[in-house]
Structure formats: C-alpha cells, structure tokens
Image (cartoon, helix red, strand yellow):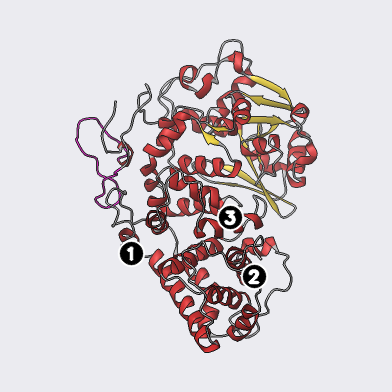
Amino acid sequence: MAVSGLCFACKPHFSLRPPLFYCFRKIRFCSVAAIETLDEPVIQGAHFSPAKNVSGEGSKLSQWKKLNSQDLGISTSNISKPTRKVLNGLKTKGYEVYLVGGCVRDLILKRTPKDFDIITTAELREVVKAFSRCAIIGRRFPICHVHMDDTIVEVSSFSTSARNFDRGLTYELERPAGSDKKDFVRWRNCLQRDFTINGLMFDPFARIIYDYMGGIEDIKKAKVRTVIPASTSFQEDGARILRAIRIAARLGFSFSRETAHFVKNLSCLILRLDKSRLLMEMNYMMAYGSAEASLRLLWKFGLLELLLPIQAAYFVRTGFRRRDKRSNMLLSLFSKLDRLLAPNRPCHSSLWVGILAFHEALSNKPRDPLVVAAFSLAVHNGGDIPEAINIAKNINKSHDSSFHELSEPQNLENLTLVNEVMSLAASVKSTLSEMTDEHFVSQAMSAYPQAPFSDLVFIPLALYLNVCKVFQCVTMGAEKGFVAKQGSRIDYELLALGSLRETRHTFARVVFDTVYPLDRT
C-alpha cells in the first residue's frame, strides 16, 4: 500500500479513509516520499507476532547463539571499575547479572562504551538494599541509579522490564519450544531492544554472550537493523529514528534496507517528541565525536530540514547533494571538533550550538580569514581583541580558500580589524537569536517549496544564554579576572560541564584548525 506525498506518522491514530492527515504541530502537511510497506502492514503498538516478525527471524532457536566472550576478545578488564563493583555486589548476593545493550556491542567492537547498563534478576527494591547509595528513579520505566566512585551505574530488573513489556501486548507471549525458562526471560527482554546490535546480553561471570536477535551477524555486516519491523518500532518510539542515525554515524554502519526505508519515510514522527528529548538525542549526535557523520546522515535521510532547517538551507543553497561525499565549511568545523571528542570525552551542548551559530553568521556574510582568526583568538582569551589581532597577524599559514565563507584577504588595518571582529561577534549573537526564533526558523527553507515545513526550536532559554556567554566577551570588552587557557590539553570533565574557559579554548581550536588546516603551509 502506498499513499502519495503524505505521511501517516504525523497523526498518532490514523485510518486509511481520510485523504489528508494533519500534523500535530500547527497546520502542517508532511511533504515526504510515499510510504511503501515492503509487504508488511503498518501496525501501531506491539501488535505483531515475535515468532514471525522479529527482524532476521531472531526468535528461531536455530539462530540463537551463545558465544564465549573471550573468543570475541572481551576481557572483564574492559568493564569500568564502578560497573564491576556493582556487578560483584549483586552477584555475591546470589542474583544473576548481565550487561546489556550498546555497551556489549561496543566491547565486541573494541570501542569504549559511553556507559554500562546492567540488568539483574533482583527486584529494584533489593538492588536498593544492596548498595548504600542507590535510588529508584522513573515512574513509567523505573530503574536504579547506583552511585559508585563518583559515577552513576544504571541497573534495571528483569521483572520490572517484563511487566512494562507485557502491558503493551495484545496476546500472551509463549516460550519458544526447546528453550528453558532463563532463555525465555533473556529473550523476552532482548525483544524490547531497539536494534539487533543492541539486543545482546553479556554474563561477565560465565563469560557468555547471548545473541537472540542476530546482533552478532549484523555487527559483522556493519548493519543497523530494528529488532521488530521498522515501521512498528519507529511508531512505538520516534526517538529510535534519531538513535538509528546516531548509532550508524558513530560506528560507521549502514542501515538495513527496511530500516533505511522507514527512517526516511517516517521521519516526521520525530516532531511528536518533547523538545527536551530532541535536545538530548541531538546532543548525543553532536557532542560525542560523531557530529560530522550525524549531519551527513540527517541530511541524507531528510531529517536535517526538520531539526535544523537553517543548516539544511545552507546545504541546499550551496548545492550539497543528499549523498554528497564532498565537504564544506560546516562539515569541516564538526570534523575538527570530532577529532577532539569521544563517547567518554563529550563536550557541553553550548559548544556545538555555538559552532552552528558561528558558521551561519559566516555563511550569511563571508569574512576575511584574518578577521575569523582574530575573532576565535579573542573568544579564547576572554575578549582581548588587540592581543588577538597581534597574534593573528603573525600567522604564517595559508587559509583554506575552498570555503565560500572566507573572503579574499584584504590586508586590513588594525582599527578596521577591530570593527570587523566586533561585527562578526554581533552577527553570531544575532544568528543565535534567529536559531531560537520559531518564525525565523520556519522561513529558512521557504525558498525550497519541496522541503517539509518546520518551525521546530529545541534550544531552551538556558542553553541560549550559555552560548551567549561564550561570545559576549568580544562585544563587551575583556573580562576582568578571566585567565585564558595555556597549552593544548583539554580538561574534558570541565568541558562536559560547560566551563567557559574550556569551551572557549576548544571553540578557538576548532575554528583555527578549520580555517588554517595543518596540511597547508
């Protein structure tokens, strides 16, 4: 079945009779490609048969795998010390404990997990009793936060997870023939995971990886595939679309054919999400070392014009195609940022939002490379523009002349340079205001009638003010008492917290390395 030019997903409960479906935000129609179901009905909720519809026939016992973790190169030393303490604490009390989700995938891929998630046979109240600093959080999906060595380790319970899962089923989930009770409990939990590569379970004591969903095979194929049919999965939780982008970008994976199809054609489901959820998902993409790849995928699958219409308009304006392998200044800025970050070394969201605003200001009015260099140095040193100009004038590297955002050097006098630097700072602040204005955002793609309409602004006031603080020193004069960072070492703990000194230092490094690449003389 296909519906030309319309998106079912924009209405939470739809039928096939009305000719048009209104989006939930104002009066908007989604101008996305037609939805084709790949011989699969579009189903709301968990109304599917696991035995028939799990991606890759993952429920078949013949494809269930139990692998030795050592054969996959996993050692318990790869697990963080706080996580090991929680695992040991529950195991010594007689409970079964497993690592689940993305951390197992990352351990197999020899990557550093962003965090470790534990699931146990203990009830949550029993987890609380087992640790001195532990609290149950969440109402709809309660879990435990165990405070261990200044780190929070998340622990969930099989029983709580099963109760939440069973509420959404319209049938009784039967144990597959030939499986034992423990396999059934683990399998049922893995059915709740978003993607097969996240549906792995690791017993670090028995040193066994349980693979019920075909996750190991998809890791080998470098594929992101939903556990249940993609249309059902994304309609259950639209955030899975953004998580699919994030995982593919971070790992360099591609999507399975079905997953790719519904990432694109159910994209407007993300407009149902709370703005705080959108910011969280965007921050995971932009702040952990995979921003460039995330922007490319968001553009490729038609999500960028919904989330960041101003940046999407830049891509259209500069003729950047959906599958373009070339780069541009926006992508280069985030490529340089990615080199400084990692899943365990993130930045505060004010940094990447500031980079977006800075680039858009340059895109609207190209500047002399010397002005850009002096501006970034002034940000770094707390607003001392004369010092920044003196340093910038001693740069003996050539700028990247391929960027349209950089004008031809004009050998500007100092007074003109000062005025131009302050003008750029004012332009960045103005652009930041526009990025948080629904009306202005809605106009960004107006010149491109085939693009879907979006006036989405997910940057909250507190974040806007934090970004303003990063740049205000340039327009308001040198800050008293501010000491610019010396050396190149980044304090990642402070950077993640949004320290002005670390954020300004990192911003300046990113801009300078973009304008004056190391491979140029």
Front: mark 1 or 3? 3
Q: How far across and down, in percent of the image, does residue 500 sit?
A: 61, 71
Residue depicted at 48% across the width and 85% down the height: 419
* Separation of residues labelled 1 and 2 (CA atoms): 38 Å
Total marks placed: 3
Q: Which residues are magenta?
A: 11-31
Left or right, 266 with reference to 393: left
Q: How far across and down, in percent of the image, does residue 498 sit?
A: 60, 65
Q: Amino acid at mark 2?
A: Lys
Residue that label 1 marks = 440
Q: Which of marks 2 and 3 precedes in the sequence? A: 3
Residue that label 2 marks = 397
Q: Secondary structure at mark 2?
A: loop
Left or right, 52 with reference to 269: right
* Separation of residues labelled 1 and 3 (CA atoms): 27 Å
Q: Please identify the quadrant where the N terminus is shown.
A: top left
Residue that label 3 marks = 335
Q: Which of marks 2 and 1 precedes in the sequence? A: 2
Residue depicted at 47% across the width and 46% down the height: 324
